[in-house]
Image: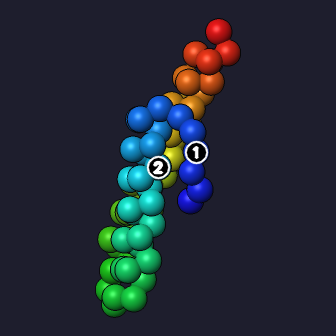
Amino acid sequence: MSYEAGSKECRHLIEAKESLLSALDALSNINSTDLIQIQIKDIYNKLEQMHDTRKKIESATNYL
């Protein structure tokens, strides 16, 4: 994931998502982790939604 300018909250969300991607990569080499991978993907998607919401808030704030 590339660097994206923004608030500290956005940067923390990006870091959290990158950590989850790293965990998914590691788990892909371990048998019987399918359910855990699905749960991590769900968490990743929730963080992605939070990040999108935060970007919209910041975009609106910067526009004013």
Res. 25 in view = yes
Q: Residue at x 57, y 51 (%)?
A: 3
Under circle 1, the secondary element is loop
Q: Is residue 47 above or below residue 32?
A: above
Rate crowding at label 1 as few (under 14), some (14 to 19) or many (20 or more) other CA atoms within 10 Å.
few
Residue 4, numbered circle:
1
Q: Residue at x 41, y 53 (%)?
A: 15
Query: CA separation, marks 1 and 2?
Result: 8 Å
Residue at the spot of label 2 = 14
**Earlier residue among tags 1 and 2:** 1
Left or right: 2 with respect to 33?
right
Q: Amino acid at mark 1?
A: Glu
x and y percent of residue 11 in the render?
Answer: 45, 43
x and y percent of residue 8 in the render?
Answer: 41, 35
> How many numbered badges does the structure rendering display?
2
Q: Residue at x 58, y 16 (%)?
A: 61
Q: Amino acid at mark 2?
A: Ile
Left or right: 1 with respect to 43?
right
Q: Which sits in the foreground, 31 or 7?
A: 7
Q: Are marks 1 and 2 in contact (CB under 8 Å)?
A: yes
Under circle 2, the secondary element is helix
Residue 61, numbered circle:
none
Q: Residue at x 39, y 63 (%)?
A: 20
x and y percent of residue 12 in the render?
Answer: 39, 44
x and y percent of residue 10 in the render?
Answer: 47, 38
Q: Which sits in the foreground, 40 or 3?
A: 3
Q: Is residue 48 above or below residue 64?
A: below
* Image quadrant occupied by the C terminus: top right
Res. 50 in view = no
Q: Is residue 62 above or below residue 19?
A: above
- Hey, which quadrant is residue 23 in on the image? bottom left
